[in-house]
């Protein structure tokens, strides 16, 4: 079933502890969300609920579907392949289908 989700991030983006650490070490330069997302402002915090990392949003791509995520997005998320990326996304978003819209939020550490 296709899901249409729309939302905006205002001051923070919640990530897993592993993703926060990966961003701190420079291995992660994007986060991918199901649906269409907006980010208000250029600087925002990545948080796992305990720690925070200030990042600058460099690009928000709302043109991709789950099937269109490829090597660039996999690398940005810190994975070796798009298959690893897709498996990880399916853990967080059960029932993902190929045509579902995804938002890729690219960032750099401030």
Image (tube, rainbow, N blue to C red):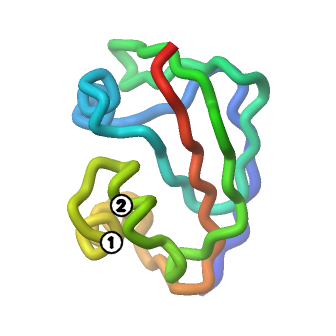
Measure how far apart labels 2 and 1 are at the Cα level.
5 Å
Question: 19 or 78, which lies in front?
Answer: 78
Residue 58, placed above or below residue 47? below
Q: Position of residue 65 (x, y in %)?
A: 60, 75
Q: Position of residue 4 (x, y in %)?
A: 72, 69
Q: Secondary structure at mark 2?
A: helix
In the rendered structure, the answer to whether residue 95 lies left or right of residue 56 reads left
**Which quarter of the picture shows residue 28?**
top left
Crowd class of label 2 (few under 14; some 14 to 19; many from 20; radius 10 Å):
many
The disc at residue 57 is: none
Question: 6 or 86, which lies in front?
Answer: 86
Q: Earlier in the sequence, mark 2 or mark 1?
A: 2
The disc at residue 74 is: 2
Please give the name of the residue rendered at 28% of the width and 48% of the height, measured from the top-left corner.
Answer: 78
Please give the name of the residue rendered at 63% of the width and 70% of the height, measured from the top-left corner.
Answer: 64
> How many numbered marks appear?
2
In the rendered structure, the answer to whether residue 22 lies left or right of residue 32 reads left
The disc at residue 82 is: 1
Q: Position of residue 21 (x, y in %)?
A: 25, 26
């Amino acid at each position: 079933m296709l899901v249409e989700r729309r939302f905006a991030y205002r001051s923070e983006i919640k990530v897993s502890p592993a993703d926060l650490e990966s961003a701190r070490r420079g291995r992660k330069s994007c986060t991918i969300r199901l649906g269409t997302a907006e980010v208000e402002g250029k600087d925002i915090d990545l948080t796992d609920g305990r720690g925070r990392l200030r990042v600058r949003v460099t690009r928000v791509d709302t043109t991709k579907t789950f099937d269109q995520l490829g090597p660039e997005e996999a690398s940005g998320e810190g994975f070796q392949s798009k298959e690893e990326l897709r498996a990880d996304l399916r853990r967080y978003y059960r029932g993902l289908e190929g045509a579902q819209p995804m938002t890729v939020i690219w960032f750099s550490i401030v």
